[in-house]
Image: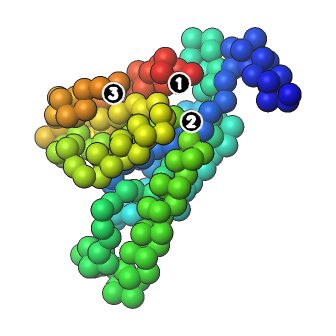
């Protein structure tokens, strides 16, 4: 009864509440984008950004993020997911100056985070799948993420990130996954994020 009443109130006042998950490979820019969204609508960042892969190893949440576009309101639980990878090798962290023991711990935490991110699919209403537009998008990781989302009928928006970098190629992402809406942005400098916000409202708002 309460859920029905809240739904009626939300429709009357043009408001809706969803859980929005940010998925993607490590270092695709998920946390940078989550921070941008959180700063724009809450005034504070969500998580720490690092060049080291798997900086985010637990689901980071920012609740009740109210996004307003053209008079409409969308309240979100913003979920920044750990990066998805097919394998995590502690040796990959050594080149960043991390000692072997810390690298082993980080790899273990990263593996646990991947499992957690997949489990959280049960609580996600819509997803932004963030891809590094300087990389080949047709990877096992991206295919796995999209397959899991599609199997659960979760609406997806592809985000081609890092368009500010040399070698960015949005066309490759569009051609690899033409069935999904796509927005190209630079989360780092905020380029075209307003278009992303409009697309979120259009597809899931």
Along the viewing direction, whichever of 97 and 63 lies nearer the viewer = 63
Identify the residue at image location x=78%, y=17%: 8
Kindly state the secondary structure of the residue where label 3 is placed. Answer: loop
Q: Name the colouring of the figure.
A: rainbow
- Horizontal side of 164 relative to 149 (left or right) equals left
Residue carrying label 3: 180
Identify the residue at image location x=57%, y=21%: 205
Answer with mark 3 or mark 2, whichever residue precedes in sequence: 2
- Residue 91 picture location, percent across and down: 26, 79
* Pointer 2 local density, CA inside 10 Å: few below 14, some 14–19, many at least 20: many
- Horizontal side of 179 relative to 118 (left or right) equals left
Identify the residue at image location x=13%, y=40%: 167
Residue carrying label 2: 125
Q: Can residue 134 be seen by looking at this rendering?
A: yes
Residue carrying label 1: 204
Q: How many marks?
A: 3
Answer with mark 2 or mark 1, whichever residue precedes in sequence: 2
Q: CB atoms at circles 3 and 2 under 8 Å apart? A: no
- Horizontal side of 151 relative to 167 (left or right) equals right
* Residue at the extreme front: 151
* Residue at the extreme left: 167
Kindly state the secondary structure of the residue where label 2 is placed. Answer: loop
Res. 31 mark: none
């Amino acid at each position: 009864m309460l859920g029905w009443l809240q739904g009626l109130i939300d429709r009357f006042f043009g408001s809706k509440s969803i859980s929005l998950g940010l998925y993607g490979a490590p270092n695709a820019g998920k946390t940078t984008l989550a921070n941008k969204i959180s700063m724009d609508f809450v005034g504070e960042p969500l998580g720490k950004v690092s060049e080291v892969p798997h900086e985010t190893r637990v689901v980071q949440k920012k609740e009740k993020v109210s996004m307003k576009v053209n008079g409409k309101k969308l309240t979100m639980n913003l979920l920044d997911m750990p990066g998805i990878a097919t394998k995590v090798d502690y040796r990959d962290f050594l080149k960043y100056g991390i000692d072997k023991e810390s690298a082993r711990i980080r790899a273990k935490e990263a593996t646990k985070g991947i499992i957690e991110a997949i489990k959280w699919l049960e609580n996600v209403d819509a997803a932004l799948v963030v891809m590094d537009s300087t990389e080949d998008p047709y990877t096992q990781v991206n295919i796995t993420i999209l397959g899991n989302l599609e199997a659960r009928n979760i609406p997806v928006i592809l985000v081609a990130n890092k368009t500010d970098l040399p070698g960015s190629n949005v066309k490759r992402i569009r051609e690899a996954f033409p069935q999904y809406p796509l927005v190209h942005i630079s989360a780092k400098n905020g380029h075209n994020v307003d278009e992303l916000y409009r697309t979120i409202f259009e597809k899931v708002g």
